[in-house]
Amino acid sequence: MSRDPAPLFTAAFDLAAWLLGRLHEQPSYLARELCAQATTLLDLVAEALRSRDALEPLDEADALLRRLRLRLRLGSEIGLLDERRMLHALGLADNVGRQIGALLRHRTTIPD
């Protein structure tokens, strides 16, 4: 029996932990929103991996990740994250995105 790979969960967890570790005590609205989106992303990834055939949590995670990336760039623009931290966070997000995309392709491929 084949199981979904755990690296997607690990990547989402790492992104959430990294953002929470740097922003959870920041009083800004954007910092709170980034932390909330990161934890919601982690929840969606966990649900997607638990529900082997469900595409909805993966689609939601993909859409949320796009919004999170935009907010990371906005956070850099307003000084919440310096450029180095923004680039690091975007790298973590890109890793999650690649894995979500691969899993979406895998789940939507029709067997011969």
Image (tube, rainbow, N blue to C red):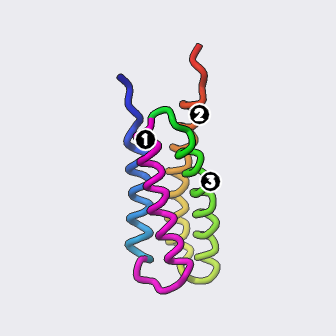
**Image point (59%, 76%), residue name:** 76
Mark 3 vs 1, N-terminal side = 1
- Mark 2 lies on residue: 105
Residue count near mark 3 (Cα–Cα under 10 Å), binned few <14, some 14–19, many ≥20: few
Magenta-span inclusion, residue 16 = no
**Image point (38%, 50%), residue name:** 10
Secondary structure of the residue carrying tag 2 is helix
Q: CA distance from mark 2 to mark 1?
A: 14 Å
Secondary structure of the residue carrying tag 3 is helix
**Image point (42%, 52%), residue name:** 11
Magenta-span inclusion, residue 31 = yes
* Three-letter amino acid code of the residue under disc 3: Ala
Quadrant in which the C terminus appears: top right
Answer left or right for 72 relative to 14: right
Q: Is residue 81 above or below residue 11?
A: below
Q: Position of residue 56 (x, y in %)?
A: 57, 43
Q: CA distance from mark 3 to mark 1?
A: 17 Å
Residue nearest the viewer, comparing 107 with 90: 107
What residue range appears in magenta?
Answer: 24-51
Q: Nearer the viewer, mark 2 or mark 1?
A: 1
Q: Main secondary structure of the magenta part?
A: helix
- Mark 1 lies on residue: 49
Q: Position of residue 77 (x, y in %)?
A: 64, 78
Give me the disc on residue 63. 3
Badge 3 vs badge 1, beta-carbon distance below 8 Å: no
Residue count near mark 2 (Cα–Cα under 10 Å), binned few <14, some 14–19, many ≥20: few
**Image point (47%, 43%), residue name:** 48
* Three-letter amino acid code of the residue under disc 2: Arg
Q: Nearer the viewer, mark 3 or mark 2?
A: 3
Badge 3 vs badge 2, beta-carbon distance below 8 Å: no
